[in-house]
Image (cartoon, helix red, strand yellow):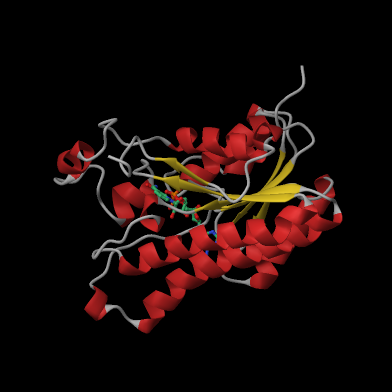
């Protein structure tokens, strides 16, 4: 039986951990070959390296490339690595960092770091992949934004700014690349259980968790594989006429 991502070659930034790891596993299970592009190969949450796990679980070809998405050269290397499997057809710009800050106390270095990873990394990751996709007459680029890219928050000024930028970069890239057959869409996760939300910004497991869950109609945090399901849809031909779209996966938090 044909698999939904058969013949696809995906580069997934931040694919070692959390949401990126589940996207990589699902893509591989659905027939894609996978390049994990991350600053580390072991998951932040612990466990074996994602590319090794995929090797055990599936028939997919996999590679790990050490890549800091704030470096244009590293992003180019990650995309080049996909040439070994036939060339990138799906780019998932997933790597990101999240922390809160007092707006009045935010220092330039912290601002630049988050912008470089969350925005510059998406911009040049998409560009590196799109150059090949345009030549090949098609491809799908998926950018990880957030519900924080839809609404402002006084606690997360910089993060919201970066994720809002990802949303409009997505729409603009879709306009630029659509005529060449390349689709660009964004996923906006709500509260998803990863190291980001248990440790970096402690929501899950904190005393505020119950109050936070009250604001989510589904009354629970999402799991990384629930974002992977959305990514499979956007990567595959099932979404062939979906372009420049924001897919919100948040248990109903934003619209209620
Ligand atoms: P995570 O911290 O669990 O995993 C992030 C991965 O990115 C890690 O493997 C890390 O090593 C990698 N990474 C960090 N900096 C990097 C860099 N400079 N270059 C390459 N890789 C780097 O995070 P997650 O929860 O899986 O989040 C993935 C994406 O989803 C992020 O863009 C995040 O902003 C977004 N998101 C997450 C949530 C959530 O609730 N977890 C909600 C909305 C959006």
Q: Is residue 93 visible?
A: yes
Q: Is residue 68 visible?
A: no
Left or right of 130? Residue 232 is left
| Residue 16: image location, x then y, percent | 54, 48
- Residue 206 in the image: above or below residue 3: below
| Residue 186: image location, x then y, percent | 53, 50
Q: Quadrant of residue 123?
A: bottom right
Q: Quadrant of residue 59?
A: top right
Pick the front one: 255 or 143:
255
Residue at 82% over, 52% down: 83
Pick the front one: 68 or 177:
177
Left or right of 82? Residue 125 is left
Residue at 72% over, 58% down: 177
Quadrant, the C terminus? top left
Residue at 38% over, 75% down: 110
- Total labels: the figure holds 0
Residue lying furthest top in this view?
1
Pick the front one: 73 or 154:
154
Left or right of 101? Residue 82 is right
Residue at 19% over, 37% down: 214
Quadrant, the N terminus? top right
| Residue 24: image location, x then y, percent | 60, 40
Pick the front one: 183 or 126:
183
- Residue 234 in the image: above or below residue 109: above
């Amino acid at each position: 039986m044909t698999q939904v991502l058969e013949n696809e070659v995906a580069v997934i930034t931040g694919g070692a951990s959390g949401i990126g790891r589940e996207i990589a596993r699902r893509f591989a299970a659905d027939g894609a070959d996978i390049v994990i592009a991350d600053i580390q190969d072991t998951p932040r949450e612990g466990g074996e390296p994602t590319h090794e796990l995929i090797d055990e679980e599936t028939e997919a070809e996999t590679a790990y490339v050490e890549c800091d998405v704030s470096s244009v050269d590293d992003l180019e290397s990650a995309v080049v690595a996909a040439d070994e499997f036939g060339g990138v057809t799906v780019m998932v710009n997933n790597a990101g960092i999240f922390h809160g800050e007092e707006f009045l106390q935010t220092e330039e270095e912290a601002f630049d770091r988050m912008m470089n990873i969350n925005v510059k990394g998406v911009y040049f990751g998409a560009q590196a992949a799109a150059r090949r996709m345009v030549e090949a007459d098609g491809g799908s680029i998926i950018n990880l934004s957030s519900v924080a890219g839809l609404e402002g928050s006084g606690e997360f000024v910089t993060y919201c700014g970066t994720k809002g930028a990802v949303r409009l970069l997505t729409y603009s890239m879709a306009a630029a690349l659509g005529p060449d057959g390349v689709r660009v869409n964004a996923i906006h996760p709500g509260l998803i259980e990863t190291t980001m939300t248990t440790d970096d910004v402690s929501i899950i497991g904190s005393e505020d968790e119950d109050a936070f869950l009250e604001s989510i109609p589904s009354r629970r945090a999402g799991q990384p594989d629930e974002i992977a399901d959305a990514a499979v849809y956007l990567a595959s031909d099932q979404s062939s006429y979906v372009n420049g779209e924001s897919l919100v996966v948040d248990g109903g938090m934003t619209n209620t």
